[in-house]
Amino acid sequence: METNHELILTVVKKVLSEMIEEKIVQAEGPTGIFETVDQAVENAVAAQKRLLALPLRHRDKIIAAIRQAALDHNETISALAVKESGLGRYEDKLRENILCATKTPGTEDIEPRAYSGDDGLTLIEYAPRGVIGSLTPITNPTGTVINNAISMVAAGNAVVFNPHPTARETSIKTIRILHEAIVRAGGPPGLISSVPKPDLTTAKQLIEHPKINMLVATGGRPVVDVVLRSGKKAIGAGAGNPPVLVDETANIRRAAASIIDGASINNNIFCTCEKEVIVVSAVADALISFMMETGKAYLLTPAQAEQVIKLIVTPEGKINTAYIGKDVQVILKEIGINVGEECRLAIFEAEKNHPLVWLEQMMPVMPIVRVRDVSEGIDFAVQVEQGNRHTAIMHSNHVEHMTAFARAVQTTIFVKNGPSYAGIGLGGEGHTSFTIAGPTGEGLTSARTFTRIRRCTLVDAFRII
Ligand code: NAD
């Protein structure tokens, strides 16, 4: 009798504790923001299993809901990103988010492949990794979250984000919005998640968590190195210093307009933005005058350029972070120059060893370096790219020149005769990505990047020919 009583008590206690646990998960889960990294990861493990149990059709519905939510809340998150981080331009953030919501591939990217022949049929399928830990940058707190969420979930994964602390509010808000859309579309709570105060401590916890199956770092070289040392499968999307090379065969007017548009989008904070112009001497004057004709550039005199450089480069030779992503008006005002709203970029002529040629400035101040001919230009552009293998741009109508530069520079993205952002699908063909994996070689990441490739072979059957 007593034994029965004890047994009933034990069962009741167990059921009660499970109910309480479920309640806690429900109370914290619906926002996608969990108190600790451990809670976020544990919930992500469960959510990923539930995602896999859903039909692919349902996953498509979830992806469509993520896209729509990003578009519906674009104004709010774009304004918040500029306000909180102090970087970029509102109208360009809007473009960034539309691009990520509409041109990040969904489940079509993981369509299976098949080999069919005399020996039967072999199927290749793209399986999820499980739970991914994603470290996101201050420069694109909304775009990276939208882009990663679509790619990673389309591939059947859950993702725990650890955003940059300086863009915490924006990133968390974006994650909440997308999470709510997922749950409304019948997706599992906790499929995408984060913690209320992401920082380097939570980043370390995420990187070391035994239930994180893959790490993705979008940021500078140091964080890429950290995830590569983790012992886990890691994808690194690192820094760039994209050169734009203009030769004597280019359509110079078009080159001038493209460079201004590409270099000034979001005040130069995209990792893909043109960071220095290298131009063949014969067309340098024309290029500068066409840039001025657009009405969007301000040409600094040598003395003014020196003043600006003192402001934006520290005595230690580093970029002064106070001016990263600021409007050109803000930077020029500091040295007493007032320019109108239409101005987007300050330009100046520089020697080859100028610090701004070698540093990733991420602000709308652009050095222009003259070279004797295209072959000197190619050699120099390869040097200033510094082996990042990120992005390079060329304006030319000479096929051999373009081929020679593309071969020499070996960048992940190579844009010809357009602004740099054409290479991430904005006004150029192809999908977009805000995690461009140069160091680890996956290129413009998409759903397929976040999968394991599996093969299933049926011998001597199922070939229908
Ligand atoms: P960052 O490297 O400072 O930070 C990126 C992320 O890594 C943040 O979440 C940060 O908290 C985290 N982090 C930084 N150091 C870490 C460490 N030691 N351990 C664990 N986590 C760490 O970069 P940022 O300033 O946010 O972004 C700008 C940089 O990112 C630029 O260099 C830019 O070129 C690059 N970027 C690259 C891509 C790409 O797709 N290749 C995209 C956007 C930005």
Image (cartoon, grey):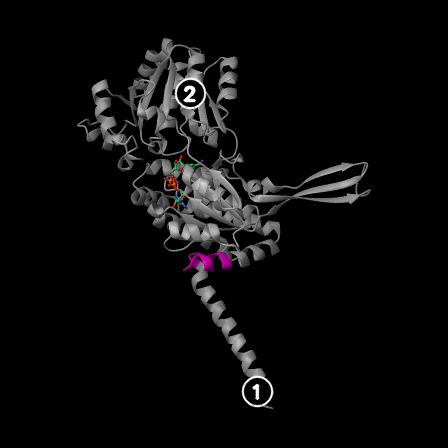
In the rendered image, the quadrant that contains the N terminus is bottom right
Q: What element carries label 2?
A: helix
Give amino acid for label 2: Ala
The residue that mark 2 highlights is 381
Mark 2 and mark 1 lie on one chain; the one further toward the N terminus is 1
Q: Quick check: 409 above or below 138?
A: above
Give x and y (percent) for residue 222.
41, 39
Indicate the quadrant containing the C terminus: top left, top right, bottom left or bottom right: top right
Q: In this view, does 463 lie to the left or right of 221?
A: right
For disc 1, the neighbor class at 10 Å (few under 14, some 14 to 19, many from 20) is: few
328 on left or right of 187: left
Left or right side of 123 for 110:
left
Q: Check residue 5 in the rendering and tell me which mark sits there, or answer none.
A: 1
For label 2, the crowd category at 10 Å Cα-Cα, with few meaning under 14, some 14 to 19 and many 20 or more, is: many
Q: Verify whether residue 296 appears in magenta.
A: no
Residue type for callout 1: His
For the point 29% across and 30% down, which residue is it? 317
Residue 173, given in percent of the width and then of the height, sits at 38, 51
- Indicate the quadrant where residue 442 lies: top right
> Whereabouts is ligand 1, in terms of quadrant?
top left
Q: Are marks 2 and 1 in contact (CB under 8 Å)?
A: no
Q: Which of 56 and 23 is in front in this view?
A: 23
The answer to whether residue 104 is seen in the rendering is yes
Q: Is residue 68 above or below residue 266?
A: below
Q: In this orientation, which residue lies closer to the viewer: 373 or 399?
A: 373
In the displayed structure, 27 sits above or below 56; it is below
What's the magenta region? 31-43
